[in-house]
Image (cartoon, grey):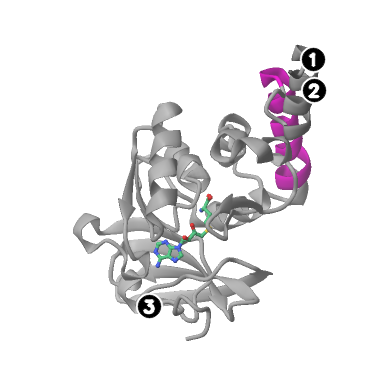
Amino acid sequence: MRSLSSKIASKFRRGEALDAEELTHRRVAMVTEQIAGRGIRDRYLLQAMREVPRHEFLPKNARCHAYEDRPLSIGEGQTISQPYIVAAMIEPLGCGSDDHVLDIGTGSGYQAAILARLVRSVVSIEFRPSLAAQARKTLTRLGILNVTVLDGDGSDGAPIFSPYDAIVVAAGAPAVPPDLLSQLSKRGKMVVPVGTTDLQHLTFLRRSGQSLNEEVRESCVFVPLVGRQGWRHSGAK
Ligand code: SAH
């Protein structure tokens, strides 16, 4: 039988036993170094990232890596995005506390949780049912009640809950999914990584009545957006 101290030591190695104080310390350092340090200025966004416990959105054995500067595996071949990319997508949208937002690619639910701190309500869609179920559990456990996680193909959006003040797509698309544009409010904004399955660029779209402004910004690498307006499951369209 293993001794108690060897059990504790192996828990430490897996990162399960990091105490709350240490995790908070790492999270605050992450925001200072990786987020504010790279030019993100929105104080509400910085505060949300200081408060939302990213480690809670990860499998237990990955929690010790929660505040590192990279995406991490969440199972099913999918990833939780690098924290900086979450901030770089959300800040330019300039979301307000009265906004209603669509988040496509729930994954772990972390990005939905950040958005939930900034806006009135979030609809989040996930293609893979097991990830959607896990994200629902995590959000409920953390008392985040203004996110509705839907199962399904988010490349079609969720017209029933539209219009949205902002749409955030957290998976790489071959092109801007046209159905999503029609679900934006009159002054709605959207961000979607567009490119190949290996490399995309964050593409920001801003609707102003009938006209649409498009701006292509930094490069990024997301898992593929699958589904009707995305890539086929195999990766190639
Ligand atoms: N925002 C997530 C990370 C997203 S990873 C987080 O904070 O953890 C991208 C996610 O998009 C994966 O979970 C993948 O299953 C999902 N996805 C891919 N195509 C999708 C589609 N058409 N509709 C909804 N979700 C999709």
Q: Is residue 25 visible?
A: no
| Rendering coords of residue 218 (x, y %) | 67, 69
User: Is the CB of the residue bearing disc 3 within 8 angstroms of ligand 1?
Assistant: yes
Q: Is residue 44 magenta?
A: no
- The residue under label 2 is which amino acid type? Ala
Look at mark 3 in the image and give the residue it sits on.
229
- Identify residue for label 2: 9
Q: Position of residue 11 (x, y in %)?
A: 72, 26
Crowdedness of circle 3 by 10 Å Cα count: few (<14), some, many (20+)? many
Relative side of 218 to 51, left or right? right
Residue 234 placement (x, y as % from top left) = 50, 79
Q: Which residues are magenta?
A: 19-36
| Residue type beneath disc 3 | Gln
Query: Is residue 31 within the magenta segment?
Result: yes
* In the image: residue 186, left or right of residue 28: left
Q: Which residue is mark 1?
A: 5
Q: Which mark lies nearer to you, 3 or 2?
A: 2
Image coordinates for residue 230, horizontal then vertical, percent: 43, 76
- What kind of secondary structure does the magenta stretch mostly adopt? helix
Q: Nearer the viewer, residue 144 or 47?
A: 144
Q: Give the distance between the C-alpha atoms of the residues marked 3 and 2, in whole angstroms.
A: 48 Å
Ligand 1 closer than 8 Å to the CB at disc 1?
Answer: no
Mark 1 touches mark 2? (CB < 8 Å): yes
- Along the horizontal axis of the image, is 206 left or right of 209? right
Mark 2 secondary-structure assignment: helix
How far separated are the C-alphas under marks 1 and 3?
Answer: 53 Å
